[in-house]
Amino acid sequence: MSSFDDVGDHVGQRELAPAPRRVPASFLLAELLPFRWWYLWGMFMIAVALIAVWGAFPLAFSITAVAALVAIYAYQLYGTSQRLALLKWGEVATVDGAETLTRGTYYSGTTWYNAYLPVASGWTVQRPRYSGPSTKTKVSYRLGDYQGDIVVRGREYTDGVVLADPRKPSRALCVTAFAYDLDRDESGNWVGRLRPRLVVGMVVWLVVMIGWLTLAAFVGVTLNHPDGPPTATRSNGVDVVGNDKMATYACDGGDIDIVGDDNAVTVTGHCHKVRVSGDDNVVIQKS
């Protein structure tokens, strides 16, 4: 009998509770607050790569910043849906074999230096610091009559448990794909304990996300009008000249003249007159 058959028999003895299983709230929270270095890198590049553009069009940064966060969460929630399905319905698959597809070298591929990369032995996932080549391993598994493959990236696969969804057996992941440890109680239900380092990462991500949205609002509003919205008074009106402007102005009994095309102007307060010259201009009055 091969070593993979031995592993399959060994992990099969550790039965899971009957599906559907409850997913701990701590696991859900960990999915909603995902600390990933490449998420931060992408946000940093958006903030600094086009800084000259943001200076000229501050509102563009706000829109791009929010869009970037939406894209990050769209990607994150796609993976979350698969992981939660496996937590709720997954069964332990039998691993038939593993094949190394690629291994990074000094000259090509990805290498890691002092990075926390998960490696599994059965259900136990360890995350020691690792320096060395990145490996892609094709893992072949069986669940009932279905035979499939998954690709494990990072550390080389040894004998980690593979969970597969019996409703859709092609949906499968190694336990290293979960940020949290899949510990179980005596009845086979998940235990929602989170590692301290994971909790710290969740807090950091929450702070980063709040700061990111605050920055987007600051750039879009404060930098667009450093001293607040210009105010049209009885003695000093406001002229809005140009095309494709999007701005807010205050009125205190004065006049606002809008000259140009495709402008979107929001007016607050009470104006004596608002004169518009040009095409496709939109004026929104707010009290």
Image: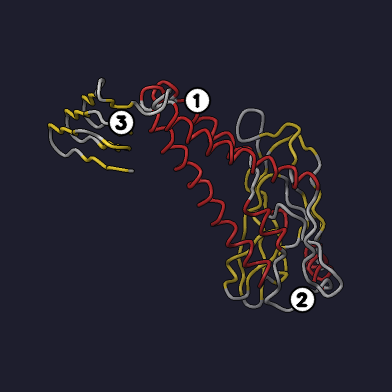
- Label 1 CA crowd tier, 10 Å (few <14, some 14–19, many 20+): few
Look at 77% across and 37% down and name the residue there. 130
Quadrant where the N terminus is found in the figure:
bottom right
**Nearer the observer, 32 or 150:** 32
Residue 249 lies in what quarter of the image?
top left
Q: Amino acid at mark 2?
A: Ala
Q: Amino acid at mark 1?
A: Val
Circle 2 is placed at which residue position?
Answer: 17
Q: How is the image coloured?
A: secondary structure
Q: Which mark's residue is nearer the viewer, 3 or 1?
A: 3
Q: Is residue 234 left or right of residue 155?
A: left
Q: Earlier in the sequence, mark 2 or mark 3?
A: 2
Quadrant where the C terminus is found in the figure:
top left
Secondary element at tag 2? loop
Q: Residue furthest left?
A: 278
Position of residue 240 measured from the top left corner of the image (x, y, whole percent): 23, 26
Q: Amino acid at mark 3?
A: Asp
Q: Which mark's residue is nearer the viewer, 2 or 3?
A: 3
- Label 3 CA crowd tier, 10 Å (few <14, some 14–19, many 20+): some
Q: Is residue 93 left or right of residue 187?
A: left
**Nearer the observer, 63 or 108:** 63
Q: CA distance from mark 2 to mark 1?
A: 49 Å
Secondary element at tag 3? strand
Q: Earlier in the sequence, mark 2 or mark 1?
A: 2
Position of residue 87 measured from the top left corner of the image (x, y, whole percent): 68, 66
Q: Is residue 232 above or below residue 24?
A: above
Disc on res. 48: 1
Q: Kindly indicate whether the residue at mark 1 contacts the one at mark 2 (C-beta within 8 angstroms).
A: no
Position of residue 24 measured from the top left corner of the image (x, y, whole percent): 72, 64
Circle 3 is placed at which residue position?
Answer: 252
Q: CA distance from mark 2 to mark 3?
A: 68 Å
